[in-house]
Image (cartoon, rainbow, N blue to C red):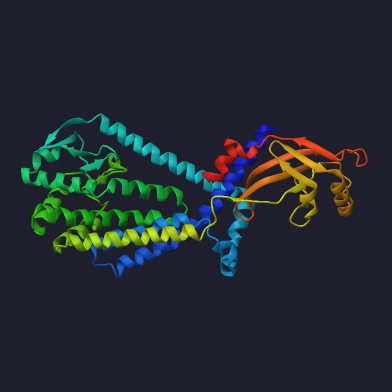
Amino acid sequence: MTVQIYLAKLDFCASYITLKAGRCIACSVLMAALILLLRRTVLKDSTFGRGIIWCLLIPALFVGKLRFFYESRMGVRLFFWWHNISLGIPWVRVVYMTGLLVSGIFFLYRRRKLRSFTRRLRRGELAGNRVLFCDISVSPFATGLFRPRIVVPETLCWELSEEELQMLLLHERTHIRLGHLWIYLLWDILRIVLWPNPLIHFCTRHFRQDMEDICDRITIQRSGERAREYGGFLLRSLRLQQADLAAAHNSVTLSGGDGYRDIKARLEKVEGFCPYKRVRVAGMCLAAALVLSGLIFGLHRASYPRYSEMEDIALYSMDGRTRLIDSESSPELAEAITIEPERILVDSKVMNRLLEKKHITSQTFVLSFGTFYKVPGVGGGGNAVFIDYGPKLSAPDILEVPYIDASKSWENWLYRNLL
């Protein structure tokens, strides 16, 4: 019985998560399509604009509990079918949760593999900077969230000049300074949560290209080098390394692309470099942060809270499947039952009249109270006690039923606050 109860609770969690995730995925498809359109049209010549526009994917994670899906005619017509599917078809939530779990495990495996790889590398100094040296020909990359490290293949140390090595290290330090390691982590989380969205995976290549374009432009301006010289350095570095970047997953690399087209497009953008004004870029970032914060705040205000308390109480059959009476449709039930800490008081006279009125002959019930819901139609938990009413004529005037408040359990806390 205990196993069945826990399986039912897991099924509820899976249903609720799948319900919210489905709406987020649908929104992310629209956002990804909009981003691809904007970066090809309006923002085609704006390096920083193409990078900032990817922030539009973040609000897609906050649309799962919008009141719009339940309280507007359009929302109900367009999206309520997903409510019925996610709650009514078990294999749908099984598929989503399995994909979520597999994606998360694969992501953690890659990060652990990269960490093991970097721990075996030789530490040293290069052009006055602490780096890690590797003996395989990969693209230089930066890795590590809290203690970033730059990994450089030894072959480049022998082939590049002192000035080019300084440029290489400046490029990787710029990635770290811009927070790209954390941004790539957020991107991976988006890919895990929204894994059924094919556009998210398709956009990864374009996303990394835009981050590299920003890094290139800042590096050129900070180094004081001309664009042609920087492009020559990139081309020379890429020729000295292999295209296999398997060791550099979840990191930012110097190559930033996986093929000839990516490298060609990147070099063309470097060739067309023009100086930028830092104040203008800072203003764009600030405006984007304000818009993003406003969107998330607005979505929060337009959504249901983490949980909503339900004031009604209800009598169910002993199997818990059939609702016999509830206080919403029968206010007399609230008069018959008094809920106190650790005990329930049942007024037999009022209860007798109510049972006769509803033509209910059963003598045992399940009383549900103190419940809450996450979104309409999706309950979260509460209290339930068994009432053995016995023969109506022999029941005491006030029947006392003790109980333990289940709403204070760790499971209900999880349901209320974490899901």
Could you say which quadrant of the image residue 103 lies in? top left
User: Which residue corresponds to the image point at 22% horizontal and 56% vertical from the top-left?
Assistant: 214
Q: Nearer the viewer, residue 74 or 198?
A: 74
The image shows a total of numbered marks equal to 0
Could you say which quadrant of the image residue 41 lies in? bottom left
Q: Nearer the viewer, residue 263 or 2?
A: 2
User: Where's residue 147, x and y in %?
Assistant: 26, 37
User: Which residue corresponds to the image point at 27% horizontal and 57% vertical from the top-left?
Assistant: 210
User: Which residue corresponds to the image point at 30% horizontal and 67% vertical from the top-left?
Assistant: 40
User: Where's residue 317, x and y in %?
Assistant: 79, 45
Q: Is residue 189 above or below residue 273?
A: above
User: Which residue corresponds to the image point at 26% horizontal and 52% vertical from the top-left?
Assistant: 257
Q: Residue lying furthest right in this view?
A: 393
Q: Nearer the viewer, residue 358 or 164?
A: 358
9 relative to 117 in the view: left or right: right
Quadrant housing the N terminus: top right
User: Where's residue 85, x and y in %?
Assistant: 61, 55
Residue 129 visible here: yes
Residue 324 visible here: no
270 relative to 346 in the view: left or right: left
User: Where's residue 350, x and y in %?
Assistant: 85, 49
Q: Residue lying furthest left in this view?
A: 162
